[in-house]
Image (cartoon, grey):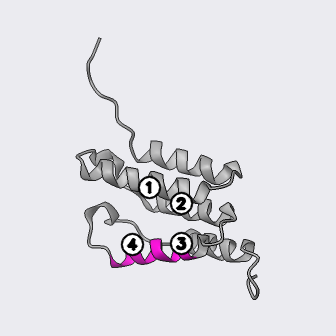
Amino acid sequence: PSNARISPDTVTYTTVIDCYAKSGQAGVGYKALSLLDRMIAAYLNGNRQAKPSTITINCVVNALARSGEEDAYDETKLLFQRIKDSNEPYFDGVNLDTISYTAIIDGITRSGQPGAG
């Protein structure tokens, strides 16, 4: 029996975040953001296999878009700004792409706000 500690990696975190997005449950946007923060904390605490990827961010944005939460669009904007302005190593290689922006447009459309969609 090995005493090796098994830690979640990028694929593990991203898969759970994607499941949140697809669940349709209330609060999934906040759950996705919370798990992203835990992922970053794990990375900063030495788990270099827990680095967020573009796919991770797209799954978080998708969870926010599908969440129905009133401030989901604002949270997405804050996340995008955080990534774009960051010099942190955990966001190195994360590039907002067509999928990222399509998800935010989907979120605006779903928001039901006047003038959206």
> Does the magenta segment cover residue 23?
no
The quarter of the image holding the C terminus is bottom right
Read off the residue under disc 3: 76
State the residue position of label 2.
60
Hey, what amino acid is under mark 4? Ile
Q: How many discs mark residues in the rendered view?
A: 4
Which label's residue is closer to the chain start, 1 or 2? 1
- The amino acid type, in three-letter code, at marker 2 is Val
Residue type, numbered disc 1:
Leu
Q: What label does residue 36 carry, if any?
A: 1
- Magenta stretch: helix, strand or loop mostly: helix
Q: Residue at x 67, y 51 (%)?
A: 22
Residue count near mark 2 (Cα–Cα under 10 Å), binned few <14, some 14–19, many ≥20: many
The residue under the point 29% across, 51% down is 43
Confirm or deny contact between disc 2 and disc 4 (CB under 8 A): no
How far separated are the C-alphas under marks 3 and 4? 11 Å
Q: Which residue is mark 4?
A: 83
The percent coordinates of residue 87 (x first, y second) are 26, 72
Q: Residue furthest top?
A: 1
- Please give the range of residues in magenta: 74-85
Q: For the residues carrying marks 3 and 4, which lies nearer the camera in this image?
A: 3
Q: Quadrant of the N terminus?
A: top left
Compare marks 3 and 4 and give the one earlier in the sequence: 3
User: Does residue 104 appear left or right of residue 109 in this picture?
Assistant: left
The answer to which image quadrant residue 3 occupies is top left
Name the foreground residue: 54 vs 66. 66
Relative height, residue 78 to residue 5 (above, below): below
